[in-house]
Amino acid sequence: MFDIGFAELLVIGLVSLIVIGPNRLPEAIRTLALWLGRARRTYSQFRKDLEQEIGADEIRQELHNEEIMAQLKDTQQQIKQSFDIDAKPSSAPKQQNPDDKGQQQSPPHKPSQPEQPNE
């Protein structure tokens, strides 16, 4: 919350020791701690009441649910795209003629001509 380092705390302690004095310093620290505790409790209670009034828990839950639904939609689109890519191969397979019934076709047959001797 505050960006106070050890050196700053040491300076504040020395100044308060000089200004307040060593006799009243422990009592001043206790009083300050009581006031800080009351302020924190008041702030905490105020925040809790405010969150209950506006329904912050429900809003957080709805936002979380919307985030999950968006992730599910993205996943669904990715799956559909992967199936679309798999369903469309680069070269279409040759379809067999229903008359073939699984038989392999032989290359076209050339009519045989009698061989003539070379003279």
Image (cartoon, rainbow, N blue to C red):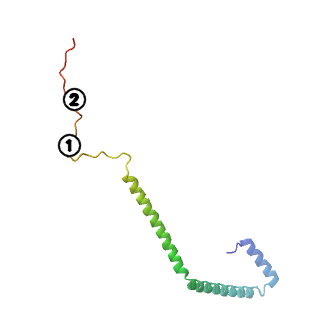
Q: Is residue 5 above or below residue 81?
A: below
Q: Is residue 33 above or below residue 95?
A: below
Residue 104, image x and y in percent?
A: 22, 41
Q: Nearer the viewer, residue 80 or 9?
A: 80
Label 2 sits on what residue type? Answer: Lys
Q: Residues within 10 Å of mark 2 (few under 14, many from 20)?
A: few
Which circle's residue, 1 or 2, is located before the other in the chain? 1
From the image, tell me which residue sits under label 1.
Answer: 103
- Image quarter of the C terminus: top left
> Does residue 53 appear to the left or right of 113 in the view shown?
right
Q: Residues within 10 Å of mark 1 (few under 14, many from 20)?
A: few
Residue 38, image x and y in percent?
A: 66, 88
Q: Nearer the viewer, mark 1 or mark 2?
A: 2
Residue 30, image x and y in percent?
A: 70, 87
Which labelled disc corresponds to residue 110? 2
Residue 39, image x and y in percent?
A: 67, 86
Regarding mark 1 in the picture, which secondary structure is present there?
loop
Q: Nearer the viewer, residue 26 or 95?
A: 95
Label 1 sits on what residue type? Answer: Gln
Q: Are marks 1 and 2 in contact (CB under 8 Å)?
A: no
